Image (cartoon, rainbow, N blue to C red):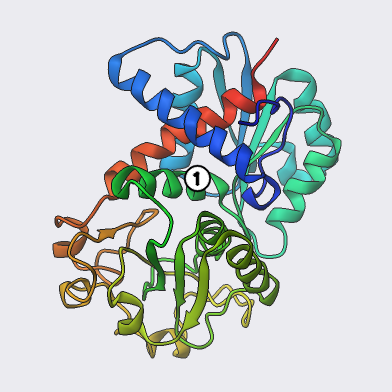
């Protein structure tokens, strides 16, 4: 078990060893048990974290704010449109100053080709741990909660057949960070991973290469298909979720001709019937219930979305406790 975390950044799980991730999971499960029993967990008493949001948030903001309060500290929500960032203040200056006023910085910045660079620039100069609340490339908070949920529901990860499936949606052009994070993380735990999407919705080549390497090194499997039904067939876990065509088209336009070709990419009861009998349906939320998934599925017996969402609280608390803890 890894025990040295204080001051460690949490920008991508690729930069955390499996020992570190396993410790993070152990702490998450322990915090969840204590939460259920009403036990006090004041591990970060008198500490503060700055929570910077360039975009909207429900689960991420509240898991961090509520989580920090439950750890005995304070989460200071910062809408970046009301910060001097809006007037051009650079990441270095923000990181240095906030470091001197508190004990951690967390940020969500999903702007394509900007978000991850911004986080890394801030982390370069910050003297406290910097946590990624979702950027254009990674969503490690979601990834660790998803891994926790799979372990919790199936009791194993080795040889679990998990399918990460693109789904049609029109709400906004969503980041690739959730499927990319899952594609990199799940093969490290020996899972048989299928990434399914219509042509045009590719993930970056470097991410696919890393996913294949992770599978080879850890006894997992990773493959890509453009056949939706093939992805559902005999799956233990399905994660049908929309993501944008950022790799091939940097336009911020939500609905275009390519998107409209793929309305049939929807999680229906018919698709779920192709999965294994005890399969689980997961989604990072918010789901586009009209387009991505039928109510009969997301509200049905296979769905674990609310347990998955709750686990965001416990994993967020674990990340903060480990990276900000100690005297």
Describe residue 153's horizontal placement relative to residue 24 as left or right.
Answer: left
**The quadrant where residue 303 appears:** bottom left
Between 177 and 15, the residue placed more toward the observer is 15
Query: Foreground residue, 188 or 65?
Result: 188
Give the residue at x 78% y 35%. Answer: 94
Q: Residues within 10 Å of mark 1 (few under 14, many from 20)?
A: many
Residue 111 in percent (x, y) is at 64, 60
Decide which of 31, 45 is in the foreground and name it.
Answer: 31
Give above or below for 59 relative to 246. above
Q: Please state which of residues 137 and 234 is positioned toward the viewer in this rendering.
A: 234
Identify residue for label 1.
Answer: 144
280 sits to left or right of 32: left
Quadrant of the rendered image containing residue 4 = top right
Residue 226 showing in the rendered view: yes
Residue at 33 percent across and 80 percent down: it is: 265
Residue at x-position 24% and y-position 71%: 275
Pinpoint residue 120: horizontal percent, then vertical percent.
77, 47
Looking at the rendered image, the quarter that the N terminus falls into is top right
Number of marks drawn: 1
Res. 64 in view: no
């Amino acid at each position: 078990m890894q025990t040295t975390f204080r001051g460690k950044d949490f920008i991508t799980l690729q930069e955390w060893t499996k020992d570190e991730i396993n410790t993070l999971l152990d702490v998450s499960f322990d915090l969840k048990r204590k939460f259920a029993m009403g036990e006090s967990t004041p591990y970060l008493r008198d500490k503060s974290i700055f929570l910077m949001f360039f975009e909207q948030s429900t689960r991420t903001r509240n898991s961090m704010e509520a989580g920090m309060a439950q750890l005995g500290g304070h989460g200071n929500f910062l809408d970046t449109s009301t910060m001097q960032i809006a007037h051009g203040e650079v990441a270095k200056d923000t990181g240095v100053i906030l470091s001197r006023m508190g004990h951690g910085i967390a940020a969500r910045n999903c702007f394509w080709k900007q978000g991850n660079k911004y986080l890394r620039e801030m982390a370069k100069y910050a003297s406290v741990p910097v946590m990624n609340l979702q950027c254009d490339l990674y969503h490690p908070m979601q990834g660790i909660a998803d891994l926790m949920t799979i372990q919790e529901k199936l009791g194993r990860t080795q040889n679990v057949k998990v399918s990460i499936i693109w789904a049609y949606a029109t709400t906004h052009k969503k980041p690739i960070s959730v499927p990319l994070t899952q594609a990199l993380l799940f093969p490290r735990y020996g899972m048989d991973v299928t990434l399914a999407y219509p042509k045009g919705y590719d993930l970056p080549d470097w991410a696919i290469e890393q996913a294949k390497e992770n599978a080879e090194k850890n006894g997992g499997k990773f493959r890509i298909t453009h056949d939706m039904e093939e992805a559902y067939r005999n799956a233990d876990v399905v994660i049908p979720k929309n993501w944008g065509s950022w790799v091939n088209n940097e336009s911020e336009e939500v609905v275009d001709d390519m998107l409209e070709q793929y309305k049939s990419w929807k999680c229906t009861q018919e698709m779920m019937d192709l999965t294994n009998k005890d399969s689980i349906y997961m989604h990072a939320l918010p789901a586009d219930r009209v387009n991505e998934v039928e109510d009969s599925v997301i509200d049905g017996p296979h769905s674990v979305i609310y347990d998955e969402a709750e686990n965001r609280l416990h994993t967020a608390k674990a990340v903060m406790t480990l990276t900000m803890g100690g005297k």
